[in-house]
Every structure is written in structure tokens, then in C-alpha cells.
Amino acid sequence: MNTFFEKIRLIWEDTLLRKKIFFMLGFLALFRILAAVPVPGIDVARLQALLAGNQFLGLLNIFSGGGLSNLSIVMLGVGPYITSTIIMQLATMMSPKLKALYHEEGEAGRLKFAQYSRLLTVPLAVLQSVGFLLLLEKQGILGDLTFFSRIVNAVVVTGGSILLMWLGELMTEFGIGNGVSMIIFAGIVSRIPTVVSQSIILFDVSQIPLYLGYAIAAFAIVFGVVIVTEAERPIPVTYAKRIRGNKVYGGVSTYLPLRVNQAGVIPIIFALSILLFPQMIFSFLANVNNPAVRAVSSFMVGLISNNWLYASAYFILVFLFTYFYTAVTFDPESIATNLQKSGAFIPGVRPGQSTSQYISKVLTRITLVGALFLGVIAVLPLAVRAITGVTSLAIGGTALLIVVSVVLDLIKKADAQLSMREY
């Protein structure tokens, strides 16, 4: 406890770190203000009913930082920016030029890659804003609007998404931690008072053992998420000795850390998109006038709504996407080439192709643990609801992974800043 308060004191005494924290808090406050400003003509009751009954929109509400829950001017949140980033990373598999730009051209290449992601965000934001507004208008959530009003709303919502992308990058540059992650984090945390108040209202004395079991399970799961998120598999690396003049360089030993969960929360996002987007489409088609289309759509909605089938498909997709995304973002050949160029080698493994194969083998094994972990965390809320029968009790899922990852990242950034202060 003394160490905790001592660290708080050191953070407060560090002028630069204190400014970064206040800068971040100020922009988060601005984001929450923007998230409370709705677009005109909303039927609040229908909006809440739609969000409660649609998991796809519930997921988008998480990544909008809660802005979709009241159709605010930032209802899209950082969703278009995240989508463009994912598309660009997937494009590195198909384009050797993009792959070289991202992996081989250093900081300048990554800056240019990030600029391409920003440019791609604009058309994605336009498409999503127009699509969502039309969709919500057909659901009766938005009143009858004129053509000019539709254009204005689309421009405002698109501008809100671009503004959040800009604020997120400013927070990353001048604040502490990743700005985009902090925006999502703020939206998730902002819902905690509402959830707590609802739990208090629905509190039942006869279910105290259930609540205690829930609290113990929640603590254990959060502890497990922290352990697996931080887990690494070190691969020993030795630098060969080199003699230049009268000096000897190299000869030191270090290690290459491979994270157990290389993919983070991205596989869950991919899997949810594949599972929930068709569900939303078939739900809308179930109301059309064509009897054949309505019958097929109703059958598909019923099939997708089966909890066991949904959970099984969800787990399998998360498992597969973990391997897929790890293969996209981590290049063993590039690592092996860089080690060889710097005169480093893995003891007992030949440099070059053998090193690449060895790293791939180790990565495949530890990714198995990460994939199983992500799959279990993803389906855990469904399992808890099925066992307890209480929909408000949901441990695990995307929100938990994001919150834990952001908190751990903030702690690391603060520790790094304090270490720099000491030196």
C-alpha cells in the first residue's frame, strides 16, 4: 500500500507526467460531452429497445464509446478508424509494397501507413453514417426527415467520427496511453454507474450466494485475464562477438519475447462481425413483403439465435481468427532476417530460414493457448447467463479485455515515464 501511495506521489511531482494526465482527462471529458449531444428527431424508447435486442448494435455501442446509445453526434465513435486499420493490416498480406512499408521502412514507413489508414477512415465513416441513419429511420427511431436534413445528419455524424479519430491521436501524442483505446475505455467505464444502479434496484436477498459467487468468479477471471495478457514466451538470443580495432563488441545474451496473446481483442471483433452482421440483415429481411424471403429469413434468424450453435460458432471463429491475425501482424521471416543482419542468433538454431521456422513453431504453440483463452473469454458471458439465468451478470467478453489491456498499458506508460525521470 505504501508503494502505491509513493507511486501516486511521484506521478504528481513529475510535471510532464502530470500535464499528460490532465491533458488526457480533459479530452476524455470533451468526448463524454460530445457523446451526450444527440442528433435531432430521436425516439428514445424505440432506440433503447433496438439496442437491447440487437447484439451487433450493442457491440458497435462499445466501440463508439457509448455514443450510439443515445444517437449522439459521435455515434460511430472510432469504429471507422478501427475498421480502416484492420483493413490496412490485412492488405499487407496481399500487397508486398504495403508489407515492406509497414515492416521494413522503420518509423517513416509506419507513419505513412498510418496516414493511409486515416484517409481510408473518411469513406468508411461516410458509408457507415449514411447506412446507419437510413437503417434507424426505417426502424422508426428517427422521424420523417427531409433530404437536406438527412445530408446534414450524415455530415455531422461523419465529422464526429473524424473528430474522435483526431482527438484520439492527440491523446496518444500529448497524453499517456493509446488515445483510441482510452476513448473506448471511457465509454465502457461510463456505463458502470448505470449497471450498478440497475443491480441495486433488482437486488434480491435470496440471491446473495449467487452474487458472492459472481464476485469471486469475476475476481478470478480478471486475474486470469491479466496473467494471460501479460504472459510471454522468451526465446534466448545471443549476439556474436565482433572485434573492431582493439575493442570487442557483442557477446551478450538477451531474449526475444513472444506474447501468448499476440492478437489482443481483434479476433473477437472479427468473429462478432461475421456472426452478428448476417443476423441483423436476416432480422430486417424478415419484415419484407415477399413470403419466400420472409420464410427463409425467419428460419435463419431462428437458427442463428440458437444459443448452443451461436456459442460454438463464436468459439471456433475466435480460435481461427486468433491464428489468422497473428500470422498477419507477426512476420517470423522479418524477425529472422533482422537477427541475422545484427549478428544475433538463437543458440542451437542456424541463422536464416531455420531461425524463421523455429520462431514460427514456437509461435504456433503459444498461440494455441492464446486462442483457447480468447475463445473462452468470448463465450463466457453466454455461459454465465445460461447457468445463472440472470442477464445482468456477464463476466468476460470484449469489454473486459479492453478495460484490462488499457489499465495495464497505462501502468506501464506511467512506470516508463517515472523511470525516465530518475535517469
Image (tube, rainbow, N blue to C red):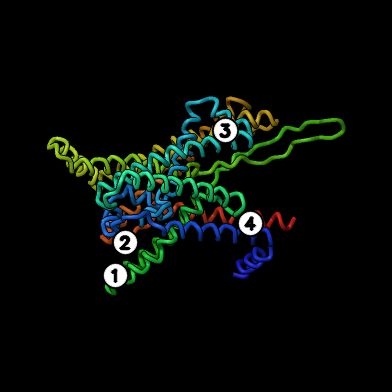
Residue 201 image point, x, y percent:
31, 71
Query: At numbered mark 3, what does the secondary structure look like: helix, strand or loop?
Result: helix
Give whichever of discs 4 and 2 has the lower sequence position: 2
Please tell me which of labels 2 and 1 falls first in the chain.
1
Residue 284 appears in the picture as rendered: yes
Q: Position of residue 145 (x, y in %)?
A: 29, 48
Residue wearing tag 4: 415
Question: Residue placed farthest to the bottom in the image?
Answer: 205
The three-letter code of the residue at mark 2 reads Ser
In this picture, residue 156 sits left or right of residue 134: right
Q: Gap in Å between the C-alphas at discs 4 and 1?
A: 41 Å
Marks 1 and 3, how far apart at CA: 51 Å
Tell us which disc is closer to us: 4 or 3. 3
SS class, disc 1: loop
172 relative to 33, above or below: above
Badge 2 is on which residue?
Answer: 392
Measuring from the top left, give residue 388's x and y in whole percent: 28, 60
Direction from residue 169 to residue 201 in the image, left or right: left
Q: Quadrant of the N terminus?
A: bottom right
Q: Residue at x 54, y 29 (%)?
A: 99
Q: Which mark is residue 102?
A: 3
Report if the CB atoms under discs 2 and 1 are less than 8 Å apart: yes
Rendered residue at 25%/43% (across/down): 309
Q: Residue at x 44, y 42 (%)?
A: 80
**Mark 2 vs mark 3: which is more N-terminal?**
3
- Disc 1 marks a residue whose amino acid type is Leu
Q: Position of residue 300 (x, y in %)?
A: 21, 40
